[in-house]
Amino acid sequence: MSRQNYYVARRLRQRRQVDEALILELVRRERQVQPRLGGRKLLHLLHADLTEAGVSVGRDRFFELLAQHALLVVPKPGTPHTTNSRHSLPVFHNLLAGMTPRAPNEAWVSDLTYIRTDEGFLYAALITDAYSRKIVGSHIGDSLEAEGCLLALDQALSELPKGKQPLHHSDRGCQYCCHAYVERLQARGLAISMTESLHCYENAMAERVNGILKQEYEMDRTFRTKARAKAAFLQAVCLYNHRRPHLMLNYRFPADVHAEAA
């Protein structure tokens, strides 16, 4: 094998390992909420996340991975159950639909996205003001749990003017439905809104911000290290807020519109 072919093969193996680590992380996350959901349903449920992260996996390989890591559901004996002690996480109606914000801090939209590195995936949580388009809260970290979303929320809340209580909109991901996140919103008096059926369309603004960071600021590339990816993410958020003219704002900067209107 030539030196070039050796390094190409090594990079492919490394990418596959990173991809499989994300698949397992997503499966374990969903298992916390639905521990006995079947493999086919799991693969269907995770398809959007995997597609966004640029990960492709077939059904056979998916089941092989689950088997290798003891994540296949073992059938239970046929015993009757009279109660369901496993409570679902809270979900809320879409209150953003039809709403047109007239000023900053009337509505926030939230989403979580994936950043690929040779050392594994990072998870970026974003909260964007629906009027000014400014990213008011952000965090990038190693965990897919709610912690990163909570840190982004804390940042947004720390800069929220006194007396303001924006509507908080998100999809129904378990990070946003978990009790800790919901309780944090309720403690500050923020109304909660979530997508109900057409998740991508019902959270289009948050999805658009993710797309801008990836397409215009190259957050969709594979970084060599997590440290480089984190630095690039922080720079991208800063440039988006302070240096990117926004068409919907008559080519003004989101941070300027947010500050002046507030």
Image (cartoon, grey):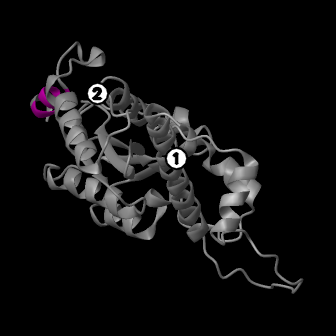
Q: Residue at x 74, y 71 (%)?
A: 73
Mark 1 sits on what residue? Answer: 13
Report x, y in % for residue 190.
32, 55
Residue 255 belongs to the span the image colors magenta: yes
Of the two numbered discs 2 and 1 in the rendering, the one whose residue sits closer to the viewer: 1
- Residue at 31 percent across and 44 percent down: it is 127
Quarter assignment of residue 26: bottom right
Question: On the picture, is 249 further left or further right than 215?
Answer: left
In the image, residue 192 sits, relative to residue 111, either above or below, namely below
Nearer-the-camera pick, 16 or 63: 16
- Residue at image location 29% in from the left, 40% down from the top: 106
In this orientation, which residue lies closer to the viewer: 64 or 150?
Answer: 64
**x and y percentages locating residue 165 in the rendered image:** 26, 51
Above or below, 81 against 208 in this view is below
By secondary structure, the bulk of the magenta-drawn segment is best described as helix
The residue carrying mark 2 is: 217
